[in-house]
Image (tube, grey):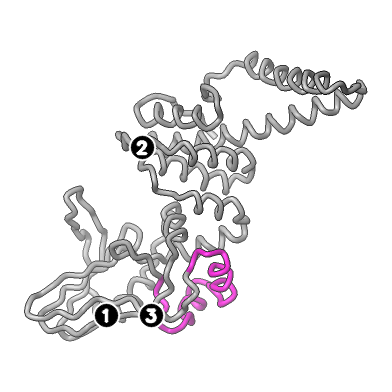
Amino acid sequence: MSLIKFEGKPIEKLIEVISQGIGTLYKPRAIRKEAEAEAYKIGIIEKAKANAIAEGKIIDLELYENIQERIIHQETRKQINIDNITQIAANQLNQEKEVSEEKVDNDWTTRFFKIAEDISDDEMQNLWGRILAGEIKQPKSFSLRTLEILKNLSKYEAEIFTKFANLKLKSGNTNVIYNQDNGKFLESEFGITFPDRLLMTELGLIASENNLEFSFSATAETERTDVLIYGDKGIVLYKKTNVPKQGIQVLVFTSIGGELSKLIEQDININYIKKVCSSFVSPNVRIEYGDIVNFPNGQTLLLNKTEYNE
């Protein structure tokens, strides 16, 4: 993992949050000296020794040395985990010019680092680094419940969830997955099986109901445009007057599942886009898909458009 420069407002806020979480001024690995690391180890050992003496315990020399090694190993591993996750967050934040001025909640920060220090797997560290960066960029993006779910998520379960998150369709605050044929298309095209769906339901990431409907209401005397977001792509329905209600069967992300899905960079599948488009075909509806661009004022623009035709 390459080291990056720890400077700029987003990085300053990152260091502030880390220091708050670990209870001391955080110095990035890139600028910590070897002597400081050794002093840290010695401090841990002496603290353990002082505690034992204070409790009137007789310390066997060999046992004491074993305790030293174990404590040093545990604390070093925890520090390396925090450093790795911090580095990932810093890489994310280095791409941001500004972050929210709102402070990250103290309880959230404490809980995050209590969990993060025990995360050793590279892929899981990547998820935790992205969470830290996301919360610094915009506090309240990830709830404490989401942290607890992710803490207990195995690498295998995370890989299964990624398959679901890759297919997320977003409209407003609603996050869904196309499931028009009760999962047959999901299994044949993306390998998402019924047991996978049960697992995600058990984990609280997908709602338990399998046949929910996501719909756009009917148009009356005015024309309307409806939009579905799929990663960096958009599906736009241009509706004339008097178009009846249109809906598709979907799987629905829970609020926690929706939060975690933001960590996944979606791999776009054109067949999936076309399958979704096919469900909204109507004589008075024109359908286009392409690259979606969102502006700060709430406007949306579709670029590199392709009109869908059956």
Disc 2 to disc 3, C-alpha distance: 37 Å
Task: Using the rendered image of the protein, determine whether residue 194 is visible from the camera's viewpoint.
Answer: yes
The residue under label 2 is which amino acid type? Answer: Gln
The residue range painted magenta reads: 177-206
Can you say whether 32 is above or below 213 in the image? above
At x 14%, y 79%, the residue is: 219
For the residue pair 190 and 62, the one nearer the viewer reads as 62
Can you say whether 138 is above or below 212 in the image? above
Quarter of the image for the N terminus: give it: top right
Quarter of the image for the C terminus: give it: bottom left
Mark 2 in CB contact with mark 3 (< 8 angstroms): no
The residue under label 3 is which amino acid type? Answer: Gln
Q: Which residue is mark 2?
A: 95
Of pointers 3 and 1, the one earlier in the residue sequence: 3
User: Could you say whether the residue bearing mark 3 is in a helix, strand or loop?
Assistant: strand
Closer to the eye: label 2 or 3: 3
**Image location (x, y in percent) of residue 275:** 35, 77
For the residue pair 265 and 21, the one nearer the viewer reads as 21
Rendered image quadrant of residue 54: top right
Q: Which residue is mark 3?
A: 249
The residue under label 1 is which amino acid type? Answer: Phe
Disc 2 to disc 1, C-alpha distance: 37 Å
Q: Which residue is mark 1?
A: 280
At x 36%, y 79%, the residue is: 213
- In the rendered structure, does residue 190 fall within the stretch colored magenta? yes
Of pointers 2 and 1, the one earlier in the residue sequence: 2
Mark 3 in CB contact with mark 1 (< 8 angstroms): no
Disc 3 to disc 1, C-alpha distance: 12 Å
User: Could you say whether the residue bearing mark 2 is in a helix, strand or loop?
Assistant: loop
Rendered image quadrant of residue 57: top right
Q: Is residue 122 left or right of residue 166?
A: right
